[in-house]
Amino acid sequence: MPGLDLTNLFEERAKLPKPTNENLRKLFEGIDRILIKDDGVYEEKAISDKVILEITGPGLVNRFSDLLEIDESLTGFYCLCLGSYAIELFANGQLRATIGFHHGRSIRYDKWNSDVALMQNENLLSFLAQLGLTGPQEEYQEDQRRAEASNIAQSEWLAIAPKCFTKFQEEIQDINLNTVDYLGELIAELDKEIPEKDKRVIALLQTYGKTSNFWTAYPIYEEAPANVLNTYNPRDILDIYERSDRNYKTRRGLGRYICSFNFRKIRKKYLKDISDDVINDLEKCFTAIGEEKGIYEINRLRKDKNKKNS
């Protein structure tokens, strides 16, 4: 499948008309046949030749057209994929337009300046399922389940995080926002909430250790405690850990921190500060939870330390 070329994409798109229901209705004028094909749309053409649903007859075509109503208040975005399906519109045997169908909730037409959300997407998906095309509805429902699970996970994460993290919830979730835009304010709020440095660092480590995926595919907000920890001297973090009760919540966070990609780049500078007791603690922690990459990184850390000491 071809990739999506973003070069000058947004500047060129801005010159095109905005999505409207009036323009969408014009696309359906005279349409007597609709083909839905697997995969999305690239350069105004369906990527796949595989037809997974054909809609004919005035009643069904009109019903599909009605349900494809767009929400004109939800435009101005552009999905980074090429879509899940292609919708081809035919009149008298001639292909008139090809519309990309994205994730059961939005569409893209290459002659509009952005993607646009669907107003009746769940009704549309139900209609397609009744005609035998269940894939879009199943994909959408699975996305909804994942979103619900993600929301629950985030709520649980915020419940154990310092309270000020909730105040910056939107900022720490925004992948496009530069961390420095809010980090200073977050740190100031955190210092007020937890004035004692040792308790503050432990809270950050325990928050950073609250994860289902230590190394990849974790939500962006989980980086927030690490971003704050990066403002401390690693020697201080290690000393504070050793002065603590060294429980498993704290061990998870410290292990994730010193085995992270960013810290590995500078870890050799701090090998003498990472004691054998710390290494043993982290090995026990990662072994107990079956975190194989963590175990590998701790063994690698131990070898680097032994090599330096030999």
Image (cartoon, rainbow, N blue to C red):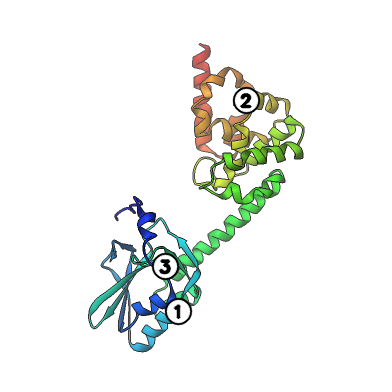
Q: CA distance from mark 1 to mark 2?
A: 58 Å
- Is label 3 in a helix, a strand or a loop? loop
Give the crowd class for mark 2: few <14, some 14-19, many >=20 residues within 10 Å.
few
Q: Is residue 119 above or below residue 299?
A: below
Question: Which residue is rendered at x = 51% and y = 37% of the image?
Answer: 292
Question: In the orientation shown, which residue stands out farthest toward the front?
Answer: 15
Give the crowd class for mark 1: few <14, some 14-19, many >=20 residues within 10 Å.
some
Mark 2 = which residue? Answer: 233
- Is label 1 in a helix, a strand or a loop? helix
Cβ–Cβ under 8 Å for marks 1 and 3: no
Please provide percent x and percent y for residue 221: 58, 46
Q: Is residue 170 left or right of residue 243?
A: left
Q: CA distance from mark 2 to mark 3?
A: 51 Å
Please provide percent x and percent y for residue 279: 59, 25
Quadrant where the image shows the N terminus:
bottom left
Judging depth in this view, the residue of 100 and 146 nearest the camera is 100
Q: Is residue 253 above or below residue 38?
A: above
Q: Is residue 17 left or right of residue 270?
A: left
Question: Which residue is rendered at x = 60% and y = 22% of the image?
Answer: 274
Mark 3 = which residue? Answer: 18
Q: Which mark is residue 141?
A: none
Question: In the orientation shown, which residue stands out farthest toward the left?
Answer: 93
Disc nearer the start of the sequence (1/3): 3
Question: Is residue 5 visible to us here?
Answer: yes
